[in-house]
């Protein structure tokens, strides 16, 4: 229920966070008070994802690395370019520009794996892409930050890499190793893992909504349009890139959702850590999380109603299609 209706839960929790002070339920605002602990929530999220990662998916990344790397490189080149171009096109100020670029630089979100399943896509390829982008994030994300943020980057790329190593890669690896070596832990995480991962991301986005109520209201229209443009451009890059690489239809669907759906929850936390004195940088990643869940759900439902093309030998270069 939580994972299937994630968009509905996200909308509900964000509304509660946004209107909490007006409802006067209590003077204590749990969303605002939890802000200092958002980085720990990301660590918990990534730990749960690592625990849920099947061993055969890790082997899949290693065995089919050319195809996985092609998709990962496509994501890490197109999305930062789209974010930078759209930010310049809309003429955003420094704070919002930084937040928009962060949206384009972070790896893909795990929600894309769930929506790929609903869309009739290649789930194995989707999970492999998410795994690859996450594990390579300490290399690609700082490089993209340095290239597109330039002087706006207040910390060194090395510091960004270190943050990603202990907040993203480390928890994923530890969670995966524990799951492989402890059968009881693995069994428990199969039930608890999705709940933990989804709840933490929901809370992170809701906390940003609570902290930036005024900014979200003021920038929602223009910023929302810009983020939607980046999102749609990401979907187009994934689908057209998959065609150019001669991927099968299920793989193209997986690549499309993977590129368009960024891990904006991670982007929100990175923005708060890298720019603590510029809180508006957190607004674009928070809005993008909501927006890409909405458009991704619509796209997945559209594809679910369309039959998948029969795969051919040429169109399926390496991976085995789920259909």
Image (cartoon, rainbow, N blue to C red):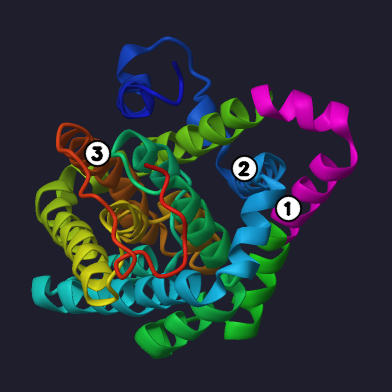
Dominant secondary structure of the magenta stretch? Answer: helix
Q: Which mark is residue 45?
A: 2
Instruction: Give the quadrant of the C terminus.
Output: top left
Badge 2 crowding class, 10 Å Cα cut-off, few under 14, some 14 to 19, many 20 or more, is many
Q: Is residue 89 left or right of residue 18?
A: left
Tell which of 204 and 321 is nearer to you. 321
In this view, which residue lies farthest toward the top?
25
Mark 2 to mark 3 CA distance (whole Å): 24 Å
In this view, which residue lies farthest toward the front?
313
* Residue 143 image offset from top left, x and y in percent: 49, 85
Disc 1 secondary structure class: helix
Tell which of 312 and 11 is nearer to you. 312
Tell which of 69 and 272 is nearer to you. 69
* Residue 1 image offset from top left, x and y in percent: 44, 15
* Residue 64 image offset from top left, x and y in percent: 55, 69
Q: Which residue is mark 3?
A: 300
Query: What's the magenta region?
Result: 170-191
* Residue 156 image offset from top left, x and y in percent: 59, 85
Badge 1 crowding class, 10 Å Cα cut-off, few under 14, some 14 to 19, many 20 or more, is many
Residue contact at pointers 1 and 2, CB within 8 angstroms: yes
Instruction: Specify whether residue 172 is painted magenta.
Output: yes
Instruction: Specify whether residue 293 is painted magenta.
Output: no
The residue sitting at 35% across, 63% down in the picture is: 103
In this view, which residue lies farthest toward the right?
181
Of the numbered discs 3 and 1, the one sitting upstream in the chain is 1
Q: Which residue is mark 1?
A: 171
Disc 2 secondary structure class: helix
Badge 3 crowding class, 10 Å Cα cut-off, few under 14, some 14 to 19, many 20 or more, is many
263 shown above or below 97: above
Tell which of 98 and 195 is nearer to you. 195
The residue sitting at 42% across, 40% down in the picture is: 205
Mark 1 to mark 2 CA distance (whole Å): 8 Å
């Amino acid at each position: 229920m939580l994972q299937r209706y994630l968009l509905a839960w996200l909308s509900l929790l964000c509304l509660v966070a946004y209107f909490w002070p007006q409802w006067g339920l209590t003077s204590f605002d749990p969303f605002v008070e939890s802000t200092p602990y958002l980085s720990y929530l990301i660590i918990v999220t990534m730990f749960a994802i690592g625990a849920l990662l099947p061993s055969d998916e890790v082997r899949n990344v290693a065995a089919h690395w050319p195809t996985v790397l092609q998709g990962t490189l496509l994501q890490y080149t197109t999305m930062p370019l789209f974010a930078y171009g759209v930010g310049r096109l809309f003429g955003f100020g420094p704070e919002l520009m930084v937040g928009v670029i962060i949206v384009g630089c972070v790896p893909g979100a795990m929600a894309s794996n769930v929506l790929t399943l609903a869309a009739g896509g290649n789930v194995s390829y989707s999970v492999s892409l998410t795994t690859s982008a996450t594990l390579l994030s300490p290399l690609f994300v700082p490089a993209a930050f340095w290239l597109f943020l330039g002087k706006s980057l207040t910390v060194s790329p090395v510091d960004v890499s270190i943050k990603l190593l202990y907040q993203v890669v480390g928890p994923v690896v530890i969670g995966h190793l524990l799951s492989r070596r402890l059968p009881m832990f693995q069994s428990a995480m199969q039930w608890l893992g999705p709940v933990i991962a989804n709840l933490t991301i929901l809370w992170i986005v809701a906390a940003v909504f609570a902290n930036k109520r005024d900014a979200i209201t003021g920038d929602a229209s223009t910023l929302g349009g810009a983020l939607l443009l980046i999102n749609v451009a990401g979907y187009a890059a994934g689908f057209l890139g998959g065609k150019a690489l001669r991927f099968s239809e299920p793989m193209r669907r997986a690549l499309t959702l993977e590129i368009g759906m960024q891990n904006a929850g991670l982007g929100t936390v990175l923005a708060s850590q890298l720019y603590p004195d510029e809180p508006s940088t957190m607004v674009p990643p928070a809005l993008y999380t909501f927006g890409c869940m909405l458009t991704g759900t619509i796209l997945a439902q559209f594809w679910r109603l369309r039959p998948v093309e029969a795969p051919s030998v040429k169109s399926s270069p390496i991976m085995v299609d789920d259909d």
